[in-house]
Amino acid sequence: MELVVCVDANLYASHHYNCFLFSRYRFNWKEIMYADEYQKLAMEFRTPTANESYALLNLAAEAGEVLGKVAKHIRDGGDTDVLRQEVKKELGDVMWMVAAVAADFELTLTEICTHNLAKLHSRKDREVIGGSGDNR
Ligand SMILES: [Mg+2]
């Protein structure tokens, strides 16, 4: 699904899912466009050895680095502003890995974000936002 920039969401609502989301959630389309632009720019830094396996494995590793920063802060204390900056850096690394894995599956970040929000909205409408199960 390719992102379509919607000036008039209602015009496209009947046949384009993303536009429905724009209308429903009042997204700022420039922010959504930025996700795909980020993915494109981030992948320009991908080296030939940063293959599909690397991206998948390092996605978990970078997520672990986020947790490690927070864990050390819990253990040792410290400046929360410093922690915030460290978490920002590590989440950036996570984002790069997400962008890479998405690209390997021929997905855009916009597709992923809009699909995720649609899923959450559906769950909320059906009052199954809590609970468990991927396909509830
Ligand atoms: Mg890192």
Image: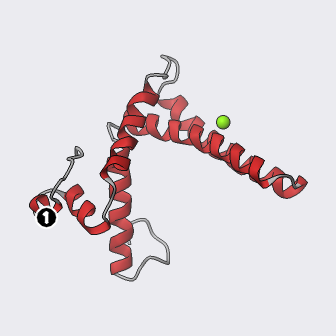
Residue furthest to the right: 76
Q: In the picture shown, does residue 77 fall above or below 97?
A: below
The number of numbered badges drawn on the structure is: 1
Left or right: where does residue 65 sit relative to residue 131?
right
Residue furthest to the bottom: 127
Q: In the picture shown, does residue 86 fall above or below 73?
A: above
Instruction: Provide residue 16's location: percent of width, then percent of height.
Output: 15, 56
Q: Residue visible at 50% across and 77% down?
A: 131
Q: Residue visible at 52% across and 33% down?
A: 55
Q: Residue visible at 50% across and 18% down?
A: 47
Residue furthest to the top: 48
Instruction: Provide residue 15's location: percent of width, then percent of height.
Output: 11, 58
Q: In the picture shown, does residue 117 fall above or below 61?
A: below
Q: In the picture shown, does residue 124 fall above or below 99?
A: below
Q: Quadrant of residue 127?
A: bottom left
Please name whichever residue, 59 or 69, is drawn nearer the observer in this view of the structure.
Answer: 69
Q: Residues within 10 Å of mark 1 (few under 14, many from 20)?
A: some
Where disc 1 sits, the SS reads helix
Please name whichever residue, 114 or 81, is drawn nearer the observer in this view of the structure.
Answer: 81
* Label 1 CB sits under 8 Å from any ligand 1 atom: no
Q: Residue visible at 33% across and 44% down?
A: 33
- The colouring scheme, among rainbow, by chain, secondary structure or one colour, is secondary structure
Instruction: Provide residue 46's location: percent of width, then percent of height.
Output: 48, 22
Residue at the disc numbered 1: 10
Q: Quadrant of residue 94?
A: top right
Instruction: Provide residue 125's location: percent of width, then percent of height.
Output: 33, 79
Question: Is the C terminus in the top left, top right, bottom left or bottom right quadrant?
Answer: bottom left
Left or right: where does residue 38 sit relative to residue 55?
left
The residue under label 1 is which amino acid type? Asn
Left or right: where does residue 113 sit relative to residue 62?
left
Quadrant containing ligand 1:
top right
